[in-house]
Every structure is written in structure tokens, then in C-alpha cells.
Image (cartoon, rainbow, N blue to C red):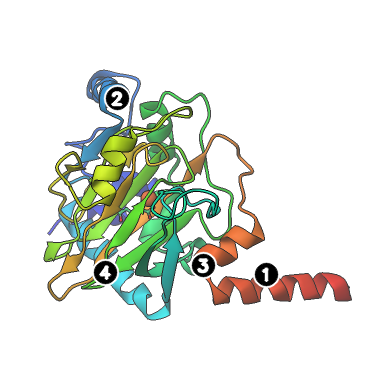
Amino acid sequence: MDNSFTTHGDMALNLVDLEKYPIENLEFGDGAKFLKDCQQKMDENGWCNFDGFIKPNALNALEDEATALQSIAETLTIKRNIYQGKVDTSVPKDDPRRREYIHVASQLADDQISESTLIKQLYKSEKLTDFIRRVQRKSALYRCADEFQALNIVALHPGSWHAWHYDTTECTVTLLLKAAEKGGEFAFLPNSRTDETEDRETVDQLLAGDMSKAKTFSRGAGTFTLFRGGYSLHGVTQVEGTNPRITSIMTYSEDPNTILSDEVNVRIYGKRVEKILAARKLARTIT
Ligand SMILES: O=C(O)CCC(=O)C(=O)O
Ligand SMILES: [Fe+2]
């Protein structure tokens, strides 16, 4: 068995199948060609899907790590509208701005994933961040500075889905760590909205349960996906079988200091984070 994933200086390069995905050097040769291809795909379609991005032996280690971490994951019941915004009671009851969807997920926030984990080291890889920046043709891109949001691991247990939504960031980066035996399919409407408008007909169709316009990939564990999650309505269909489906979500921002408000973090991460923030506030008033 090839155990080379523990020997390289930059963890991304240790874990990633560099023969298939030459992200080590994007300036010349195969790497430059690969980058150009990714940029074109991103421009044209709004997504890139990299099947088998992680080497098989590294994938086993990542999956074991994510499974072990589940013992400290909190089960959250998430209720929100697709825009993750305030519920507008002035619009009709079935309007998407008013309708809320519920799903249940076991979620680990960034502060629960230690620096020594493989997944955190992969996320912290400068080479990987640079690759993600360049695929989107951004002049600057930083890993999200929020102590809870930056890197998350989300497990959907059998019977759960991930409700349709737009992300609060422009581009979303996910790595599937453990696939569902059945179901648990990532589905999205590429570029279903812009800053000005939304393709409401297609959006309403998906919200009504018609998946015919939604894009899905056959994604095995180890698939790395970039998509314009802030502009593409997306979710995950119900997980079936006996395994949870586990995915890691990596977030980035063009601003090096992006943090969420305490209110949003409490809404997303629940009681544990509420307690941390309250204790911090109390400590500030005492000192
Ligand atoms: O699990 C996935 O593939 C997508 C998750 C997602 O959309 C999110 O966490 O915002
Ligand atoms: Fe999302």
C-alpha cells in the first residue's frame, strides 16, 4: 500500500491524486493546462467536479477521522428559507421568501476540528487555496476567518436530506468523505440567480419536488466539488441505507477578515456556540 500521503510538506499534495489533478504547479505544463480547463468549466457552467481527487489510502484515513469525530458532533435541526434570510411575512404564504424548510444534520464547526487532523491540514494548504482562487479567477481569496464557519463537517444520517438553499458565500467547495449507500445525492440548479434576478420558474419547479432541471453528479467519496453555491439553488436528497453521508465544507472569502455575527453563528451552530459566546461576553464584563 502506498503511504506517501504522510511524507510531503504540503498536506494537500500528500492527499491529492496529483497525477489526475496536477495542482502542485499551476504555472507550467500539465498544471497550467489543467487550470485553464477548470477556469473554462467554471466560466461556462459555474461548477467543477473532481472525481477521485483524494488518493484511495488517504481517503480511508480521512473517512476514519471524520467518523471518529462524529462522537462530538451536535445534531442540529436547521429551519430556514432558501435565501437563508429573514422570513418576509408580507408575501404570500407559499412564496419562497416565506416558506421554511427543515433538515437535521450532525455538524462539526471549525473549532471542533483540531489543527492536527488531516482534513484541517488539507483545508489549510496554501496550494489548495491558491488552486481554488485561480479556478475562480480571483485576485485574492482567503480561507474564511470565522472561528466556527471556516471548515465544517456535516453528516446526514439515513432519513435526512439537506434542504434546498443558497449559500451565503459565492463559491462553495465540498469534499465528500463518505458516500451514502443510496440516495444522498447532491443536486443543484447551476446559476439559478444573479445579483439582480432569479429564474423563479425553475426554482419553483425544484421546490415543488420536480428534479428534472437539477444537475446531479455521480459522486463517490473523495470527490471534490466547486460550485457557485451563492447563486445556484442546491441541496442533498434523502440519505438511504445504513451509513451516514459525510461531507466537509470549506469556506473562503475575498476579504481576509470575514466573520459572521454572533446571532448568525448561534442560529447555525446552536447551544454549544451560544454558551461559548455568552461566557466570552461575561468574561469581558468582569475584566
Ligand atoms: O453536502 C453537500 O454536498 C452540500 C452541503 C451544502 O450545501 C452546505 O453545507 O451548504
Ligand atoms: Fe450549501
For marks 1 and 4, give the CA distance.
29 Å
- Horizontal side of residue 60 vs 280, given as left or right: left
Are the two marked residues, 2 and 4, in contact with CB atoms closer than 8 angstroms?
no
- Horizontal side of residue 154 vs 202, given as left or right: right
Nearest-to-viewer mark from 3 and 2: 3
Chain-order first, disc 4 or disc 3: 4
Chain-order first, disc 2 or disc 4: 2
Task: Reply above or below: 137 against 208.
Answer: above
Nearest-to-viewer mark from 2 and 1: 1
Chain-order first, disc 2 or disc 1: 2
**Mark 4, residue position:** 160
Are the two marked residues, 2 and 1, in contact with CB atoms closer than 8 angstroms?
no
For marks 2 and 1, give the CA distance.
41 Å
Q: Residues within 10 Å of mark 1 (few under 14, many from 20)?
A: some
The amino acid type of the residue labelled 2 equals: Leu
Front one among 128 and 85: 85
Chain-order first, disc 3 or disc 2: 2
Are the two marked residues, 1 and 3, in contact with CB atoms closer than 8 angstroms?
no
Q: Quadrant of the C terminus?
A: bottom right
Callout 1 secondary element:
helix
For marks 2 and 4, give the CA distance.
36 Å
Task: Reply above or below: 198 against 62.
Answer: above
**Mark 2, residue position:** 35
Callout 2 secondary element:
helix
Instruction: Say the numbered circle drawn on residue 269.
Output: 3
Chain-order first, disc 1 or disc 3: 3
The amino acid type of the residue labelled 4 equals: Ser
Q: Position of residue 266 (x, y in %)?
A: 58, 66
The amino acid type of the residue labelled 3 equals: Tyr
Q: Residue at x 39, y 28 (%)?
A: 136
Callout 4 secondary element:
loop
